[in-house]
Amino acid sequence: MPRAYASAVLNATADEVWAYLRVAPVTGTGQALVEWWGEFSADPGDEEAMDKTLSHGIYATGLDALARRFA
């Protein structure tokens, strides 16, 4: 059974930041598929920096940590 989690980040550089995490079992292997993504609204001048912060500073770092923990 897939499990999901959503959160909002307050006091961020962006107007709104929503993060979503979904974990679903991979049938027959005992492994899991982990998806972590976000949506945000920011001033046009801040969009690229927010995208880098979320994708590289948070999501990639967090997914790498999960991979190491459960390897």
Image (tube, rainbow, N blue to C red):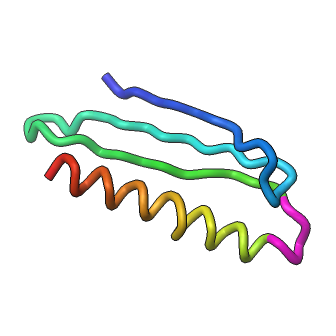
| Image: 61 above or below 49 | above
Q: Position of residue 14 (x, y in %)?
A: 82, 57
The image quadrant that residue 53 belongs to is bottom right
- Residue 40 lies, in percent from the top left, at 75, 54
Dominant SS of magenta comes to: helix
Name of the residue lying farthest toward the top: 1
| Rendering coords of residue 9 (x, y %) | 71, 43
Which image quadrant: the N terminus? top left
Residue 21: x and y in percent read 48, 40
Where residue 67 sits, quadrant-wise, is bottom left
Camera-side residue: 63 or 26? 63
Describe residue 47's horizontal placement relative to residue 43 as left or right: left
Q: Residue drawn 33% across and 61% down?
A: 64
Q: Residue at x 51, y 31 (%)?
A: 5
Up-down: is 50 above or below 69?
A: below
Residue 47 falls within the magenta-colored stretch: no
Q: Does residue 43 show up magenta in the picture?
A: yes
44 sits to left or right of 18: right
Give the magenta-colored segment's residue range.
42-46
Q: Is residue 57 toward the left or the right of residue 35 in the image?
A: right
* Image-based side of 23 in relation to 48, left or right: left
Tell me the residue at 66%/69% (across/down).
51
Numbered disc total = 0
Vertical relation: 52 (above or below) 4: below
Going by the picture, which residue comes out furthest to the front? 11
